[in-house]
């Protein structure tokens, strides 16, 4: 019992350092991370323009490619693109 | 005339979770963050140790983000607090495993500068070495003992708060602390220090 009291006092002395505090911007940083990220109006127009131009260019370039080859290419690339996008989201939010 | 109460401060955790799930109620989530940020941070820092407060803050932030994502699937079988503390405990342990090899070294020289007006330099150095030995011995204890010790002695948490954070009844927390002191006593004796 005596030793326990001595150890209790030693621990109090040893751990007398000031406890750390959360930094003041903690809440704001959390809220920023959980808020859904939306593109600005300009960003949306640019993305829509890119999709239209890229789609039209791809269709024109592949006009003589057989449909089966196009399907095969899509089957291979779409899962990779979706996986990369999901991985990107995960590392962005630090999961 | 008093301080302005945050929105939703009067709602229960369950109601706040419901409001978060019903739709985009940012204020309900902000209130959950306000309620748990401090204790989640303290739990994380009690696991990671004194030198890793910035990492503990990152853990607290990650836990809040995970809480936000998991609210949709939270069914309320467990108490909300127990659930979030379990997530925090496990995440802090994972982070600790990653950072354990870059623990900052505190030299004897730095420890010897601990101010004390009425003791000789030799006594102060011996005292500093003993404190260092205590910290080293604590780091060798089981995780739950380390956490309980730091929460109690360093962060000043009450037995009931420690019990909530470690998901253990108060009597179990008391026995963790008692057992930890016994182990420390033996470990210090092995290294040639006493508790006096």
Image (cartoon, rainbow, N blue to C red):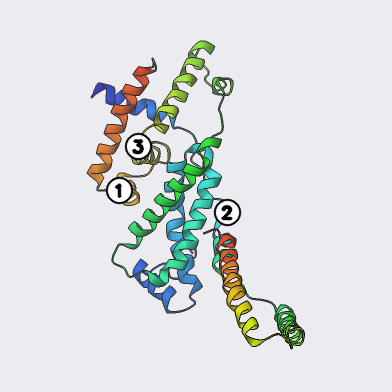
Q: Earlier in the sequence, mark 3 or mark 1?
A: 3
Residue at numbered disc 1 = B163
> How far apart in space, not on screen, are marks 3 and 2 (Cα)?
32 Å
Q: Residues within 10 Å of mark 2 (few under 14, many from 20)?
A: few
| Number of the front mark, 3 or 2 | 3
Residue at numbered disc 2 = A24
Q: Name the element at disc 3.
A: loop
Relative to A51, is A15 above or below? above
Give the chain of mark 1: B
Q: Is residue B123 left or right of residue B113?
A: left
Relative to B146, is B125 above or below? above
Q: So how many labels did they put on this image?
A: 3
| Number of the front mark, 3 or 1 | 3
The percent coordinates of residue B20 (x first, y second) are 44, 73
Q: Residue at x 41, y 69 (%)?
A: B71
Q: Name the element at disc 2.
A: loop
> How far apart in space, not on screen, are marks 2 and 1 (Cα)?
27 Å
Q: Name the element at disc 1.
A: helix
Q: Is there one chain holding both mark 3 and mark 1?
A: yes
Determine whether label 3 and label 2 are within 8 Å by CB: no
| Number of the front mark, 2 or 1 | 1
Check residue B142 in the rendering and tell me which mark sits there, or answer none: 3
Please indicate, yes or no, whether residue B67 appears anywhere in the rendered image.
yes
Q: Residue at x 25, y 22 (%)?
A: A2
Q: Is residue B88 left or right of residue A62?
A: left
């Amino acid at each position: 019992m005596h030793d326990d009291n001595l150890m209790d006092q030693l621990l109090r002395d040893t751990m007398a350092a000031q406890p750390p505090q959360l930094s003041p911007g903690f809440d704001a940083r959390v809220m920023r991370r959980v808020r859904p990220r939306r593109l600005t109006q300009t960003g949306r127009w640019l993305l829509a323009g890119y999709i239209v131009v890229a789609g039209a260019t791809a269709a024109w370039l592949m006009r003589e490619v057989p449909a089966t080859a196009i399907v095969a290419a899509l089957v291979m690339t779409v899962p990779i693109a979706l996986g990369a996008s999901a991985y990107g989201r995960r590392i962005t939010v630090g999961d | 005339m008093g301080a302005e109460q945050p929105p939703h401060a009067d709602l229960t955790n369950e109601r706040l979770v419901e409001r978060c799930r019903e739709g985009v109620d940012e204020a309900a989530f902000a209130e959950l963050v306000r309620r748990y940020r401090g204790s989640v941070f303290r739990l994380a820092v009690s696991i990671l140790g004194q030198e890793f407060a910035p990492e503990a803050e990152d853990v607290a932030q990650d836990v809040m983000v995970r809480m936000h994502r998991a609210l949709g699937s939270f069914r309320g079988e467990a108490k909300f607090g127990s659930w979030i503390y379990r997530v925090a405990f496990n995440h802090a342990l994972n982070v600790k495993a990653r950072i354990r090899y870059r623990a900052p070294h505190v030299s004897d020289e730095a420890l010897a500068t601990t101010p004390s007006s009425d003791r000789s330099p030799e006594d102060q150095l011996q005292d500093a070495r003993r404190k260092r030995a205590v910290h080293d011995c604590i780091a060798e204890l089981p995780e739950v003992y380390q956490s309980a010790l730091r929460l109690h002695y360093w962060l000043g948490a009450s037995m009931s708060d420690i019990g909530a954070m470690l998901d253990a009844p108060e009597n179990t927390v008391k026995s963790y602390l008692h057992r930890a002191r016994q182990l420390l006593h033996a470990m210090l004796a092995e290294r040639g220090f006493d508790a006096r």
